[in-house]
Image (cartoon, rainbow, N blue to C red):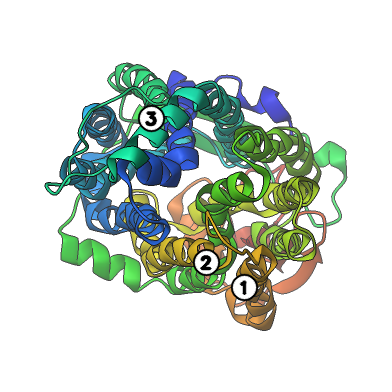
Amino acid sequence: CEGFSSLSGSPTELYKAYLLKFLDSYSYFSFSIIFTLFLSEDFGFSDVAAGSIYGAWGALVTVYGLVSGVMVDNMGVAMSLKVGFALSLLSRISIFFTNSKTVLLWNVCLFLPMGNCLGIPVLTTGIRRYTTAINRGFAFGLFYVIMNVAALLSGPVVDMCTILHKDKNNAEADSNDDAGSNVEDDGALPEWSLTGYRIVILTGIIANVLAVLVAFTVREIKLDDKQQAPIAAADATNDSNSNSKTTTSVSTFQPLKGSPTQILRETLSTPSFWRFLAVVMITLNIRMIFRHLDATLPKYMMREFGPNTPKGTIYSINPALIIILVPIIQAATCEVDPLVMIHYGIYISAASVFFLVISTSVTACVLFVIVLSIGEAIWSPRLYDYTMSISKEGREGTYMALSSAPLFLAKLPVGFMSGYLLQKYCPEEGERNSKAMWLIIALSTVVSPILLTVFWGYVSKKDEDDVKVELKDFDDEKSVTEYMADETPFTEEVNESSNLVIQRKNVPSASSSRASNISDEDSKEIV
């Protein structure tokens, strides 16, 4: 792994994708941290209602992503980004200015998730198009780090906007209590005010405006890479490997168009899709802990430790550690299979919740976020790599949409679950039993790593659709055909450093028209 030097010569679209990732992630994270608090304090929703709306927002991003997957494949990355960021901007502006529950719900349940589903998922496809097989792993790691830089910024911004405005908010709350209610019968609040939560949303609008401007400069391109070199044996020396040479060129990418029925049939007939779908379903519970980080932890900290608790700063420990750890871990494990890293990492993330089961303290909250982050740094970036490595080029939108469908089954319930557990075990007033709440969350989370271990034999299986045949240095297609038609059996050996099973066979030189300086031994790599 050559790190940043491997990205030299990349098209400008790669760096635009990174900038869009930062801007979109800031808008998303800053909003998600304050979302349930905004719903309860500015619009008067109960814990259960606020949690359910939060869950609906996340679930509908998945639903619209499923519906729009075919559309993304037909429109391409560039156009999808333009539409998505423009729609998100209009929705955020509406949420900022509205004083009506009805308008708020229309935006949260329709326009904002429609824009969201054309943002981050499409950027993931873009990273694949703008990189090569050699630098793609590092590029996805950097992609993940940039997302967490935005999350790191969002935490202190939330604290500044909400804590600095607490006196004004408390005064308004007292006034509303005297009036008896903060919500009129038609669902509208009596008066709009610039609360700390709305200031947070305003900062997201500014980031979204910049994202729209950048999105309209993105071209529909792809980076072609062709590697020309003799394939080294499993025990080849580093010197022989260094002789390989990769040439890249930028070309216009034509979206692989097709009817919805054709695209769906093509994707669903791929065995690797079903194994990936199994991984997605198994890891649902561990991925939902991040929804509790957004929806449950902020209210828990405010109720247990007071309104001045730096919830945003504690939240920012997560992205800070990700920024530090991901490049280190990626560089040290770049040759390890992504699924192996996912397997180990989710055990660590699942263990993090038990700190809150043992202790109700700010220290426990900090330890929870630290251990969760260590596990996340190990497995979460590799999930991008794993997803893109097995999806067919031109069908990434449909592939990711279908594989994300099970998230709908989890995002909506986890929002309701968050609100219910807060209301029952950590109410704003009355007796609390927060340890029981976190025990329930911990037990539901630890299911993921256990199931992945149980079904490891199936999800890690390599089928024919996972086989990449690299036949290099032949002069023409006829030579390749003759080589593959030869009945000489393959022999196998394992290259531990690259985690490949190397299959070779000796073919008489007369049957091949390769250059004279190339050995008659070639290989088929199963990755």
Q: Nearer the viewer, mark 2 or mark 3?
A: 3
Task: Estimate the spatial distance between the alpha carbons at disc 2 and disc 3, rounded to whole Å.
Answer: 27 Å
Task: Name the quarter where the N terminus is drawn.
Answer: top right
Residue placed under numbered mark 3 in the picture: 172
Left or right? Give the position of 385 relative to 50: right
Tag 1 residue: 440
Q: Give residue 206's position: percent from left, percent from top.
A: 37, 18
Residue 491, quarter of the rendered image: bottom right
What residue is rendered at 37% in x and 51% in y?
396
Q: Earlier in the sequence, mark 3 or mark 1?
A: 3
Give the class, few, some or many, for how many residues have Cα within 10 Å of label 2's Cα (few <14, many ≥20).
many
Dot 2 falls on a residue whose secondary structure is helix
Which is more toward the observer, 164 or 79? 164
Q: Which mark is residue 421?
A: 2
Q: Nearer the viewer, residue 317 or 19?
A: 317
x 81%, y 40%: residue: 240
Does label 2 or label 3 sit earlier along the sequence? Answer: 3
Whichever of callouts 1 and 2 sits on the residue coming sooner in the sequence is 2
